[in-house]
Every structure is written in C-alpha cells, then in structure tokens.
Image (cartoon, helix red, strand yellow):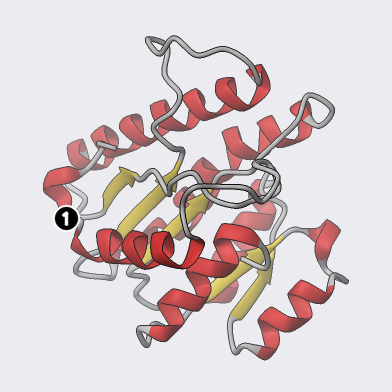
Amino acid sequence: ANRGIGRELANHFQARDYDVNGTYRPQTRDDTSVVELKKQRVHTFEVDLTDEQSTNAAAVAYGERPLDVLVNRFYEMTAEDFVSHFNINKLGPFLVSKAFLPALSLSPLGKIINLPGKLVGVARKYGGNTPYRVSKINLNQLTKTMAVGLHEAGSKVATRGVHPGWLPTKMTGFQSGDDMDTRMKGLVETIEKLGTEEAGGF
C-alpha cells in the first residue's frame, strides 16, 4: 500500500472514512514511502507475500475485527524479475485471502477484490510481455476458483476481479490515457457496490 495503485486506493478509502490497513514488503521497510504511509495514519504490516507464516502473522496482528474489503494488488513485472514476482502474484492473493478470511467473515459484506485486469486471457489475441500475461491469467483463475469455493462453503464473503484501468504506473512509463485520481474514485465506488451476486466475475 506504500506505492502506486495501493497507495492511491489507501488515500481514497481514507477520504471515505474507512479505517485503512496496508501491507509493505520487507524489501521496502526503510523506504520513505513506508514512513509517509505510517504518518498518514494507515495501520501497516510488513508481509512477505510468498510466506504463509508472514501472512498469518499479519492476520494475527490485525486481530479479531471485522474486515470489510481486502484488496489484492497485482505486482507488475519484467522478464528479469519473472520468478520472484510470478510467485508473489500466484501465492500472495491466495495466502493473504486465506489468512484474513476469518476477519472478512465477521463483516456482513466482506469482499475480496483482486486487481488482475481485463487485458489478459487465453482467448485474447495479444502478444508480448509473456511473464506479465501468464501471471495475470493465474490471478484471474484464482479469483474464479476462490469465489466458487467460498460459495460452496456457504460463506458470505464475495470475491471479484476488477480492472483498475490503464493507469500511469512504472510499467506504462507513467504514460496513460486514464487519470489516476478519476480511476481510483471509480474503483472505490465499484468496490462499494459489489455484492455476492457478482462474485467470481470481472
């Protein structure tokens, strides 16, 4: 939550009077962005998204409180960091969602929101950036599988994939046709409106 889309979402949820909790990776603990996030009164947790003990520890630190929305942000990658970020994108959403499911279940409208995007699918005829696309397809499938599993278990928690838009991030060279502030406002509004009837969709 200390950078990019995660940081913007934290800002917009706070503006709507949400009590915001955010994670940061161990590699960024000394980053100025983490310090600034803490000054913003965001409750922060250092989490290794590929380590189940780490995600479970964050859930324990969060405590037995209702959690209304859990957002799993997709990590952008290049060929050079394919292995590390593929593991984060593959394991992170599953481990974090599993760890925080008890807290989400305490909320009358608990939601797991994955941000995989619409641009990737096995039927889409676009090439290039193979690591990025393979990783996103995995997150799309995880979203659907989690939604079905939770429904079959009788859980009220809804899982949904939401496309955040083509945003000015590091991967796009900070060039984009979509305005970050406008998109984030719309994203938060979409998340608030989602219910169990849309679970598993995009």
What's the residue at 19%, 55% (across, down)? 156
Image vertical order of residue 12 relative to residue 187, above or below? below
What's the residue at 16%, 50% (across, down)? 196
Residues 101 and 143: in front is 143
For the N terminus, the quadrant is bottom right
What percent of the width, then of the height, locates residue 127?
Answer: 57, 12
| CA neighbours of label 1 inside 10 A, class few (<14), some (14 to 19), many (20+) | some
Image vertical order of residue 188 relative to residue 148, above or below? below
- Farthest residue, direction right: 30
What's the residue at 31%, 45% (across, down)? 160
What percent of the width, then of the height, locates residue 149?
Answer: 28, 35
35 relative position to 38: left or right: right
32 relative position to 188: left or right: right
What percent of the width, then of the height, locates residue 198?
Answer: 17, 44
Residue 119 in view, yes or no: yes
Total number of numbered labels?
A: 1
Residue 64 in view, yes or no: no
Q: Amino acid at mark 1?
A: Gly
Residues 25 and 146: in front is 25
The residue that disc 1 covers is 195
The image quarter containing residue 151 is top left
Residues 142 and 198: in front is 198
* Element class at badge 1: loop
For the C terminus, the quadrant is top left
37 relative position to 109: left or right: right
